[in-house]
Image: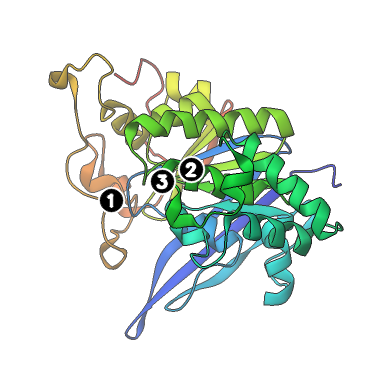
Amino acid sequence: MSAGPLLEVRDLTVMLRRGARDLPALDAISFTIEPGEVLGLVGESGAGKSLTGAAIVDLIVPPLRRTGGTIALAGQRIDRIPPGAMRLVRGRKIGFVFQDPLTSLNPVLTIGRQLVDTMITHLEIDRREARRRALAWIDRVGIAEPERRFSQYPHELSGGMRQRIVIALALCAEPSLVIADEPTTALDVSVQAHILQLLRDLHLETGIAVMLITHDLGVIAKMADRVAVLYAGRIVEIGPVAEILTRPRHPYTVGLMRAMPPTDGDISRFDPIAGTMPTLATIPPGCAFHPRCSRATERCVAVRPDLRPDGPDHHACWHPILEGSAR
């Protein structure tokens, strides 16, 4: 095992081909994840969160294409390996939890068959041992009657049960990293907390690292060690969760915090960010957030800021918020 970061992403760039133009869907994204760490990726829809996760495990398809950057897992480059080798990385070294569990589950195979096949593919065990472990995983993710569920098909399970099976599939081959892409979005509110608690419990139990993709800063506060805030395909702020949630520097981060629904139900304190995120074809020059930012100056309009350190935090802003609270 490398002594450095478990995952190291440097200058990851993904372009969208539209007609004769290449539009930057991800623009030089860089971050690391340490062994056992939970890194949250947060931002509005269209910020590039899910695309980042998909690009790491080579799950993007034309007209999207990765055009630059490096991706290393435990010190080994995985951005240049052939598709067959990447299929082995996915599952064995990196597990993936999708937003919609039906995306991950084969509707014509039983739950047990899918778990068994995954483990046989990635682990040196026979079918009998894989079956034993599959039953144990069904129980481990909190589903009653493992023997019965083992023989059922995805459509016979509730949405919450399907997502628990997806988590079991992501973890059963004992990867060192799981990418969880909005793992509760497709679920009822009553089920979401149970799924998040399950992910947290399994993370603590197994020591696995997690990249948690979400639009919800409340989830980040409960689950993550560090958080990267994305806007228009770039990281605008990254640092320890406690630091960023108590002393955010970037106005966009502050806006996300103010836009969180108040826990006391007082909607008069709900303060959404004015305007909308630009499309890929309309990302402005300078700081992409400047049309929505009350602190923007001519420098923000003309010159794009790069990430720079500010204590444990890194931010990309010419006029960071240096003191005071987010609210």
Which residue is denoted by mark 3 in the rendering?
Answer: 159
Residue 36 percent across, percent down from the top left: 71, 35
Which image quadrant: the C terminus?
top left
Kindly indicate the quadrant of the structure image that contains residue 144.
Answer: top right
**Distance from label 3 to label 1 (Cα)?**
45 Å
Secondary structure of residue under mark 2: helix
Q: Nearer the viewer, residue 93 or 114?
A: 114
Q: Residue furthest bottom?
A: 20
Count residues near mark 2 (Cα–Cα under 10 Å), then give few for <14, some for 14-19, many for 20+. Answer: many
Residue 301 is marked as 1
Secondary structure of residue under mark 1: helix
Residue 6 percent across, percent down from the top left: 74, 46
Observer-side mark, 3 or 1, equals: 3
The residue shown at (49%, 32%) is 196
Observer-side mark, 1 or 2, equals: 2
**Distance from label 1 to label 2 (Cα)?**
48 Å
